[in-house]
Image (tube, grey):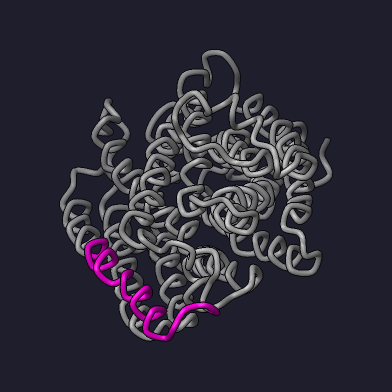
Amino acid sequence: MEAALPVEEKPTSTVIPMAIIGVLFFIFGFVTWLNGSLIPFLQIICDLNEFQALFVTFAFYIAYTVMALPMASVLARTGYRNGMALGLAIMVVGILMFIPAALTANYLFFLSGLFVLGTGLTILQTASNPYVVMVGPKESAAMRISIMGIINKGAGVVAPIVFTALILADLGDLAHEGAGTMTEAEIQELSNRLIMPYIYMAGVLFLLIGLVKFSPLPHIDPEEDLSEGADEKTSVLQFPQVILGAVALFAYVGVEVIAGDTIGLFGKNIGVAHFGTLTSYTMVCMVIGYLIGVTCIPRFFSQQRALLGSAIAGCLCVLGIVFTSPSSSAIADVLIGWSGIPTVPNPVMFVALMGLAHALVWPAVWPLALEGLGKFTAQGSALLIMGISGGAILPLVLGKLSTSLGDMQAAYWMALPCYLFILYYAVAGYKLRSWGSK
């Protein structure tokens, strides 16, 4: 394990550490937001309904819950830098598992590879998020995480476009008609298109292992930040702000994944021709939200105010999804029609706008939830990472509702309670320092 730097030897500049972590956040985004394009693709080649297709998100995000605490233990032994290198190596294994999955067009093989990918990302996220919080002043932590968010979601803009160009090009009507109209040979040829892109991805990640392993990334020991009162506690479970923060992140990641990964499926269902690139719409909206965070926190409003505004805006977007007509694209005409970007029906546009609405939830919750944890910061970080399991469970809930109701648009109602809990956390939950306190 790397030795912790004495306080006086810590770098005065955060540029190099932030640049290295920024590269990792780009990888997080590219791999994570490929799922939005992968879901309708696997629905075609594996002949799945909406509920079955959304097991892509379940397999990927449930790894965060299953592996968060074990990976925190690994980090305690390896330190941040070696742990990040290990996480990248695990991701290489997960990506290479897509090769036999594509050769057999076997859905369970794909899901297994996604779980291993999620495991590698778990250790990277567990190390990198508290690192970004602690590498500089607390009051600007949300701003630094917003910078990482821009990089992450910027990769999310690129990933669906690359996926569509390499994988979904020339599909024609097959994209909408599905496996039932394709011969076995056509399905296999389509599945095989995944192989070379994933081999390239594995190669890039292998090179990044060397970059992280031999980088000048300093080790930051969370026990150095023993905030007043933290040593009076005997368990991380005695900190309501982090427990409720994990629930808020569960709700947030659930709606984030719904906005990013179901938009393509929703668009496909209502006949949007360019459904494979729709995840990019959500990611662009999230980048805009993160830019607001970078420029405005804490200069114009606090992390708590950002969280409050995100929750309210998210509630309004859900109402827009449910109550607007798929036969009209008036909102998209106004917002993006002038840009030359293909417009989309109003409900799809509101799904994309969810990205703008909740962009600042993640960067705001982390510093609010970790404040005052001191020596429990690493355990608190692991609990917050476990909240990412919302991305596994809540999209499945939407998929089940969609299948049961026969109406995917109406199923988006389930996102409203998620935003309401985030609203509670922004108003009162983050203030609690002991159970039963007001």
User: What residue sits 21% from the left and 58% below the top?
Assistant: 204
Q: Main secondary structure of the magenta part?
A: helix
Q: Position of residue 85 (x, y in %)?
A: 27, 59
User: Does the rendering let one see residue 76?
Assistant: no
User: What residue sits 27% from the left and 26% below the top?
Assistant: 13
Q: Is residue 69 left or right of residue 428?
A: left
Q: Position of residue 306 (x, y in %)?
A: 62, 27
Q: Is residue 368 magenta?
A: no
Q: 291 and 308: which one is in front?
A: 291
Q: Residue 186's image quarter?
A: bottom left
Q: Is residue 343 left or right of residue 325?
A: left
Q: Position of residue 262 (x, y in %)?
A: 59, 55
User: What residue sits 29% from the left and 66% below the top?
Assistant: 198
User: Does the rendering let one see residue 23?
Assistant: yes
- For the C terminus, the quadrant is top right
Q: Position of residue 189 (x, y in %)?
A: 33, 77
Q: Is residue 186 magenta?
A: yes
User: What residue sits 44% from the left and 41% below the top?
Assistant: 153
Q: How many marks?
A: 0
Which span is picked out in magenta?
180-202
